Image: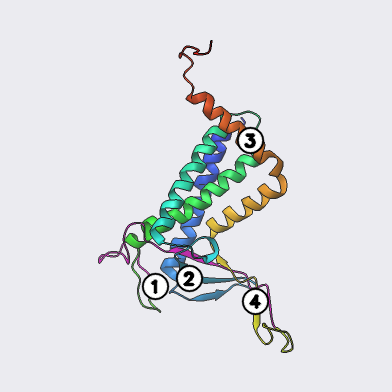
Amino acid sequence: MKISSGKLAALIIALVIVIDQAVKIWVKTHFYYGEELQVTTWFRLLFIENNGMAFGMELGSKLLLTLFRIIASGAFIYYLWLLSKRSDVPRGYIVCIAMITAGALGNVIDCVAYGLIFNNPIPPQVAQLFPPDGGYGTLFNGRVVDMFYFPLCEWNWPQWMPVIGGDHFVFFQPIFNVADASLSVSVIVLILFYARHLATLTSGVKQQEAEQDTDPTEPDQTT
């Protein structure tokens, strides 16, 4: 039996969030802050935390950023609900939107709850889940846990190069989590394969929303 678009989206969101939170909680309770485990020469687990957006970027107030994430997640959930009522939407498009939603929600959980449910011990001690003395922060002020680090290659720039001469360069430097990966990969897939659908589907959803807001029993006022 073919699963409906709405159930598919809900399943993807739940799966990504469960994996994301399981990895974060494991890292948080088994690694001290800054601890690194080298899996291969190009793949490492490095436990860091950040107050900002995906890949550790910082942008404005922490509280405002958390509230923005919550509002954006709600908007994506509503958008998915409208898409699920249409039969002309490619399932790949719905999968991408569901993964973006899951990525946003995964980091929202960190921001909202982690300050309350984890402590912040001095390394090399590791954090405790639900510590008896309370968490390290307040509601909406938790830090996002990152751990995946892929330094694929690195080198020193030649001394003769202007500005960057002699600097050490590492590719790829960002440290991220499952939620970041889910969000970023799905955005890339949307751009590559569903760019022409995006404007059409969005306008169709807006029209569908407008039709739902129209009361069919209201008499026509035109003359």
Q: Which mark is residue 215?
A: none
Amino acid type, residue under disc 1 in the picture: Val
Q: Which of 95 and 67 is in front in this view?
A: 67
Q: Residues within 10 Å of mark 4 (few under 14, many from 20)?
A: some
Q: Can residue 4 be seen in this view?
A: no
* Residue that badge 3 annotates: 201
* Location of residue 67 in the rendering, given as x and y in whole percent from the top left corner: 41, 52
Give yes or no for contact between labels 3 and 1 (Cβ–Cβ under 8 Å).
no
Give yes or no for contact between labels 4 and 3 (Cβ–Cβ under 8 Å).
no
Give yes or no for contact between labels 3 and 2 (Cβ–Cβ under 8 Å).
no
* Residue that badge 2 annotates: 48
Amino acid type, residue under disc 3 in the picture: Leu
205 sits left or right of 163 in the view: left
176 sits left or right of 189 in the view: left
Work out how far the residue at label 1 is from the one at label 4, CA to CA, in angstroms: 28 Å
The residues colored magenta run 127-156
Q: Is residue 146 magenta?
A: yes
Q: Quadrant of residue 6?
A: top right
* Residue that badge 4 annotates: 170
Say which of marks 4 and 2 sits in front: 4
